[in-house]
Image (cartoon, helix red, strand yellow):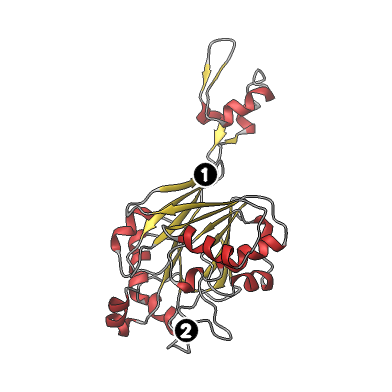
């Protein structure tokens, strides 16, 4: 299991008794990320046993309250818990000012360092990378500047084909790292043993795309092409396409069309408008276009 996504909140606008605004916890290749932080996020983290201390990077899609009003509360809690490790926050320009003002005014002391990465580009860009995972922005179109995020595992090293390697007694364990790195082996006779003979292909690197509030935007398809897991907002049923256009949101059918065009493996839809009492209709409608559609629900876990 290389990807585990926990839905903390998946409804739009105002929180309700059993409906929480957007927030997700992503584990990918043993790295841990928080995506959006609507009101009540840290309570949901406690409820669903998400490890606070494992999160070192928080990604905020845009500065509408239902996507970041829980952030300052979480940061304050980190201070109370005496966090010392630095914390990176990625989001639109302005997130640093609004966050630090709240912390300053409330005199919320924090020993740990907050590092802000403010985004302004309307083109997809690489914003985080380490030896396990890379993260790119997915430029979206909403009423304010908004980005989705594409999380991709780094390609793993090739696997040793021990059956074939055993046929060359001259190859030593000391050669294994070079073989995994893709290098050929030159024997004492001068014979070159190709890396393809000595290795097996690694497991496919997996990916997750998060597309929060946005109107229908087909030009994101090349960015998320062949993604294993896609979350795409679907605030309205197809019958309210007029309202979706007016508010710059998407319908179930539009989210499904994006998933189909991008050839993703699995689609998750969420950000349901509060006008709907039965969200099962969302799934049925999206499945007309893209069969492997699932509903986001608080506490629901998706594994790849």
Q: Are marks 2 and 1 in contact (CB under 8 Å)?
A: no
Quadrant that contains the C terminus: bottom right
Is residue 229 something that shows in the picture? no
Q: Position of residue 165 (x, y in %)?
A: 62, 27
Residue furthest toward the top?
189
Comparing 190 with 278, the one in front is 278
Pointer 1 local density, CA inside 10 Å: few below 14, some 14–19, many at least 20: some
57 is higher (above) or lower (below) than 188: below
Tell me the residue at 45%/85% (across/down).
274
Name the image quarter holding residue 259: bottom left
Q: Position of residue 202 (x, y in %)?
A: 54, 42
105 is higher (above) or lower (below) than 251: above
Comparing 45 with 182, the one in front is 45
Pointer 2 local density, CA inside 10 Å: few below 14, some 14–19, many at least 20: some
- Callout 2: helix, strand or loop? loop
In the rendered structure, find residue 154 and report the number of the disc placed on it.
1
- Callout 1: helix, strand or loop? loop
In the rendered structure, find residue 279 and report the number of the disc placed on it.
2
Q: Position of residue 25 (x, y in %)?
A: 58, 63
Please report whichever mark, 2 or 1, sits nearer to the chain's N-terminal start.
Answer: 1
Q: Please indicate whether residue 153 sits to the left or right of residue 83 in the image.
A: left
Q: Please indicate whether residue 231 sits to the left or right of residue 303 in the image.
A: left
Comparing 112 with 289, the one in front is 112
């Amino acid at each position: 299991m290389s990807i585990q996504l926990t839905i903390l909140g998946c409804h739009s606008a105002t929180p309700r008794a059993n409906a929480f605004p957007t927030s997700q916890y992503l584990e990918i290749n043993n790295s841990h990320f928080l995506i959006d932080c609507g009101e009540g996020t840290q309570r949901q983290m406690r409820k669903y046993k998400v490890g606070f201390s494992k999160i070192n990077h928080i990604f905020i899609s845009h500065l509408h309250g239902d996507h970041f009003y829980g952030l300052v509360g979480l940061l304050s809690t980190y201070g109370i818990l005496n966090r010392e490790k630095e914390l990176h926050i990625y989001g639109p320009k302005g997130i640093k000012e609004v966050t630090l003002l709240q912390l300053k005014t409330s005199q919320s002391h924090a020993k740990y360092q907050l590092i802000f990465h403010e985004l302004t580009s309307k083109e997809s860009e690489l914003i985080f990378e380490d030896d396990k995972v890379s993260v790119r922005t997915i430029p979206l179109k909403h009423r304010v500047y908004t980005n989705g995020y594409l999380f991709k595992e780094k390609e793993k090293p090739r696997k040793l084909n021990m059956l074939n390697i055993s046929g060359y007694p001259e190859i030593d364990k000391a050669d294994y790292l070079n073989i995994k790195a893709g290098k050929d082996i030159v024997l004492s006779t001068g014979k070159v043993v190709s890396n393809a003979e000595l290795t097996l292909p690694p497991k496919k690197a997996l990916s997750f795309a998060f597309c929060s509030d946005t109107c229908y935007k087909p030009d994101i398809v090349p960015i998320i092409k062949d993604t294993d897991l896609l979350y795409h907002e679907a605030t309205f049923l197809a019958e309210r396409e007029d309202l979706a256009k007016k508010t710059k949101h998407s319908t179930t059918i539009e989210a499904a069309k994006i998933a189909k065009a991008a050839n993703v493996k699995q689609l998750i839809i969420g950000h349901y408008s509060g006008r709907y009492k039965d969200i099962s209709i969302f799934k049925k409608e999206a499945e007309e276009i893209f069969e492997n559609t699932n509903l986001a629900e608080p506490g629901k876990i998706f594994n790849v």
